[in-house]
Image: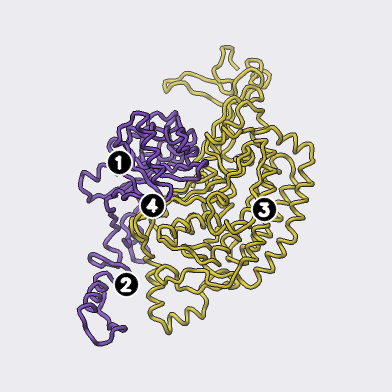
Chain colours: A yellow, B purple
Amino acid sequence: MTKTPNPDAYATARETTEGRIYTLTGGDWDSLLAETDPLSAERLVVNMGPQHPSTHGVLRLVLELQGETVTQARSVIGYLHTGIEKNAEYRTWTQGVTFVTRMDYLSPVFNETGYCLAVEKLLGISAPERAQTIRVLLMELNRISSHLVWLATAGMELGALSMMIYGFRERELILDIFELITGLRMNMAYVRPGGVVADLPPQAHAKISEFLRVMPGHIKSYEDLLSGNPVWRARTQGVGFLDLTGCMALGITGPVLRSAGLGWDLRKTEPYCGYENYTFDVPTQTTGDVWGRYLVRLAEMRESLTIVEQALDNLRPGPVMVTDKKIAWPAQLALGADGLGNSLEHIRTIMGQSMESLIHHFKLVTEGFRVPEGQVYVPIESPRGELGMHLVSSGGTRPYRLHVREPSFVNLQAFPAMVEGAPIADVIAAGASLDPVMGGVDR
Amino acid sequence: MNAPSTPDMGVGSEVTPASEARRAERDSIGMFGVSGTGDTSGFGGLVRRFAPVESSPRPFGGYFDELVDALTTALAAAGVAPDAIMRVVVDRGELTLYIRAEVLLTVVQQLRDSPALRFELCSSVSGVDYFDPDAPPETALQRLHAVYHLTSMTYRRRLRLEVAVDAQHPRVPSVTSVYPTADWQEREAYDMFGIVFDGHPALTRILMPDDWDGHPQRKDYPLGGVPVEYKGAQIPPPDNRRAYR
């Protein structure tokens, strides 16, 4: 190191004709620390991410530290921006489903259902009762799987590695159910405008019943594992605090808002898909910290189980798609060994016997149906809060504009409010408690 | 391609004026609502037109009348000219108020704080680009819309505010002083549509890189790309591909 004071402790500088050049050097620690001790005295800016394992995807956190205390925190997003909203403007209304399902990849059924409810509202139609019940069934299973991933990753980040294994293990049970019903584990594009793409297969009832039988025991075991654990309590209680005033100002919804004491749940306040016919509670806590959010999510999983049970009982035989042949695809999809596809029987019929079906199929798949001009906003309660679909139609075969009010995106704004003034270790717990999914944040 | 006249199966061979009219109507529209040249090959390009938005007549129905009256009273008390609300549109059970950009901040302040309104939550802020290259200049001017979706948790009501600005001077007052949650959402609308929110604490790009040129979700934003030749056929870049209306 040179004797003159260096503006940057980690690099040597020299003046050249091009300006000042810094050279990063592997220095001598003693001489480096003799000049400055960043841990105690100096303001230190730390970039966490975008590839840090604890940031739930490609999220970059810029933390300004004074010693171990975070004095300022900012989150930088956009690393996973894929232009889904813009892409949807160049696809038919039905194809839009395959795009939105990839936004928040932990809750694909919610994205699909919200989008389809918006298209249906623009069209002035509503899906048949059986389709609505299937949507509720899948949404609640999806809520459990999403909360399981939260519990698994949050547990892992705070040192409860067993929780990670358990959470992903039980999520697998739900993904198996999804695979049985839709042919895919994630991003299934199963909910379509006008209903759902295919009816439940005959084995679904037994498989879901089996899941309902085993799952309460598993949730109990998570509680046994974590709730009494002194490390878990110490790292969650009083951490990431955000009170109701803060939540309201920052537009926070979902479990984070309910952990601050307001029982605002769109399934209760503005029911859709027939949620008014189900009996369930909206769990709340008043602690407003990570601990409260953990308790709320655990309780929500239990409530979701009761809704799934009621939905199974409510299933009545009937169509799963609107009968309007100008909207519903004539395709009869069948679940084969390699996933969902056209049934051979159906192809034989349309190719050999029904010219009209063939024309309709061709027109609906290539050109798509028209949606009357106008705009709607449809909010639903996703595992992370209010998922709103603002959809504008110009009367054509494609969306004119799709804007998604993503709860992950809005909730992530609360991150600085939660961590500024806290030790750096709590950044992980507080960020995790917001449950941001970057696919949803960046879209 | 015009729809070929097919035998009228239901009516039989009897030709009446009514059936003639029906047939003419069907032939002109076609089964899939084709109008104009009826070019369904897709080479006609993507044409999008919007009918002018008109005010809905009273009564609006539901809580809408009460809400609009309460807002008008609150605005009058705040000293805002009565033409602040340019249009009231009720469509598909949703209420939209078209607001002058200058008074937006006063309007949202009243909407949040007035005891009869209490819109505590700003659910969503988004932009829409109503771009029509063939539109007459007076409508083409107001092409960029900032759309706000507000939620009243107290009364369980929803409301949409729409503010239109022209693309040359796309300035809208920021509502972040009333709804801090609008911060990132306004940044996104700025990033994607170039709407400048005056008074925003740090209006920078949020999803696109900082040095990005242009605003990608504007309708006249070039998609780019080059034609690609594949097995003798040329596939044009995305902008120039054929598309159904």
- Same chain letter for marks 3 and 2: no
Write down the residue under mark 4: A375
Write down the residue under mark 1: B86
Mark 3 or mark 2, whichever is nearer to me: 3
Between residues B218 and B97, which one lies in front from this camera angle? B97
Write down the residue under mark 3: A303
**Mark seen at residue B31:** 2
Between residues A265 and A100, which one lies in front from this camera angle? A265
- Same chain letter for marks 4 and 2: no
Estimate the spatial distance between the alpha carbons at disc 1 and disc 2, rounded to whole Å. 38 Å
Label 4 neighbour load within 10 Å: few <14, some 14-19, many 20+:
many
Mark 4 or mark 2, whichever is nearer to me: 4
Callout 2 amino acid = Met
Q: Residue at x 77, y 55 (%)?
A: A217
Indicate the secondary structure of the residue bearing disc 1: strand
- Same chain letter for marks 3 and 1: no
Left or right of A97, for residue A65: right
Callout 3 amino acid = Glu
Q: Are marks 4 and 2 in contact (CB under 8 Å)?
A: no
Q: Position of residue A196 (x, y in %)?
A: 52, 65
